Amino acid sequence: MKAILVKQPGGPEQLMLGEYEQPLPGPSELLVKVHATALNRADTLQRQGKYPPPKGASPLLGLEIAGVVEEAGINCRHFKKGDKVFGLLPGGGYAEYAVIDEAMAMPVPDNLTMEEAAAIPEVFLTAYQALVWLGKLQPGERVLIHAGASGVGTAAIQLALALKAEVLVTASEKKIGACLELGAHKAINYKEVPFEDEVLAYTNSEGVDVIVDFIAGPYFKQNLECLRLDGRLVILASLGGGKVEEVDLRQILTKHLHIMGSTLRSRSRDYQIKLTHDLREFALPLFRLGQLSPVIDTVYDWEEVAKAHRYMETNQNIGKIVLRVNS
Ligand SMILES: NC(=O)c1ccc[n+]([C@@H]2O[C@H](COP(=O)([O-])OP(=O)(O)OC[C@H]3O[C@@H](n4cnc5c(N)ncnc54)[C@H](OP(=O)(O)O)[C@@H]3O)[C@@H](O)[C@H]2O)c1
């Protein structure tokens, strides 16, 4: 089959369309003819040799797909040849064919294109996990979502609104409008003003209940300042670095704070299946109604994969970058 290969660890120029062995579905797996896949930061790190795939996963890039079932394993009960499915993979999405655990596959809603469906799994599962499972966000609570216009951020804004929370975000100037259009109540240009001052001013010094953070080190101190009593901080990435200096940890005690972190890819199969199940129950009806929708910045043909990676690495995208897989 055709697949995107990494010639050797390095820059986007190392990506090339080539040939790779077609995967075989196990008894509980579906072989899917991939119509679309989407980019994640993990792909850019894996391309550079900095993020090896988990044990047993395909060495090919690609954490999510949408496509049509070509073959269903002998134990599969829910999907059959010809069904349109989408879902999260441990790897192998940048390919003409991919295998997915049947329990991780979701049916593509009729109102969504394959490109739209491929833009959902990683960011909506991550955002759901952060807001609901870890952050325990409740109706009427306030959440601060950093990098609000990122793929995960745009999913988190929509899910938090669906959960009836008040949503504050940080983003760079050109992306503020997109966050407000998605329904964020307050969007802060973090490059212009200290975000903690704006959060405290907007909330009458009360602070927020939950923070979803991708920046880590440089935001840790300010995040603690923004959290109110019983606040929850969920750290999903360290885009700003992993080191923290001069933080007064006593706030964690006095405000009864919870500090959590997670990477979805390293979670067990059972965890990912349960998360997929919960997202599917909560979100698929809302996708069907158009109350949730993936935010797509650009769709590239997969021959342009190097261009797509370069674009992601310039931090310009609002929402997802999708690859159309042409066979
Ligand atoms: N833990 C998990 O399970 C999990 C799952 C999926 C993704 N992630 C991680 O979550 C992060 C977001 O993923 P994504 O695919 O949504 O990313 P994305 O769409 O590429 O967006 C990332 C955005 O973060 C902002 N940013 C980057 N560096 C920054 C910095 N140093 N300080 C402040 N803002 C910065 C930029 O937006 P502005 O222009 O607004 O600054 C950038 O466009 C990535 O690091 C990814 O690896 C984690």
Image: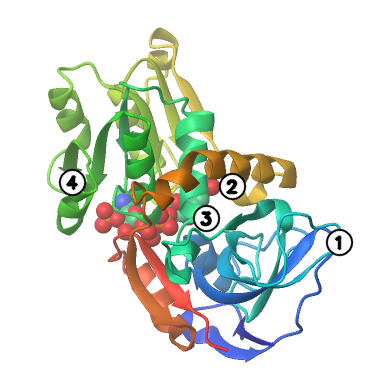
Answer with left or right where residue 226 lies relative to residue 47: left
List the residue tagged with mark 1.
27
**Mark 1 closeness class: few <14, some 14–19, many ≥20 residues within 10 Å:** few
* Coloration of the structure image: rainbow
Q: Kindly report which numbered mark, 2 or 4, lies closer to the viewer in this rendering.
A: 4
Q: Can you say which quadrant of the picture contains the N terminus? A: bottom right
List the residue tagged with mark 4.
180
Relative depth, front residue between 54 and 289: 289
Q: CA distance from mark 3 to mark 4?
A: 23 Å
Q: Residue at x 34, y 54 (%)?
A: 150
Amino acid identity at mark 1: Pro
Amino acid identity at mark 4: Leu
**Mark 2 closeness class: few <14, some 14–19, many ≥20 residues within 10 Å:** some
Q: CA distance from mark 1 to mark 2?
A: 24 Å
Q: CA distance from mark 4 to mark 1?
A: 46 Å
The mark that comes first in sequence, 3 or 2, is 3
Work out which residue is located at the far top of the displayed protein and give it. Answer: 254
Amino acid identity at mark 2: Leu
**Disc 1 to disc 2: CB gap under 8 Å:** no
Residue 218, horizontal then vertical, whole percent: 34, 41
List the residue tagged with mark 2.
264
Under circle 2, the secondary element is helix
**Mark 3 closeness class: few <14, some 14–19, many ≥20 residues within 10 Å:** many
The mark that comes first in sequence, 4 or 1, is 1
Q: Can you say which quadrant of the picture contains the C terminus? A: bottom right
Residue 109, horizontal then vertical, whole percent: 49, 58
The mark that comes first in sequence, 1 or 2, is 1
List the residue tagged with mark 3.
121
Asked if disc 2 is less than 8 Å from ligand 1, the answer is: yes
Under circle 1, the secondary element is loop
Q: Residue at x 72, y 65 (%)?
A: 80
* Residue 85 seen from this side: yes
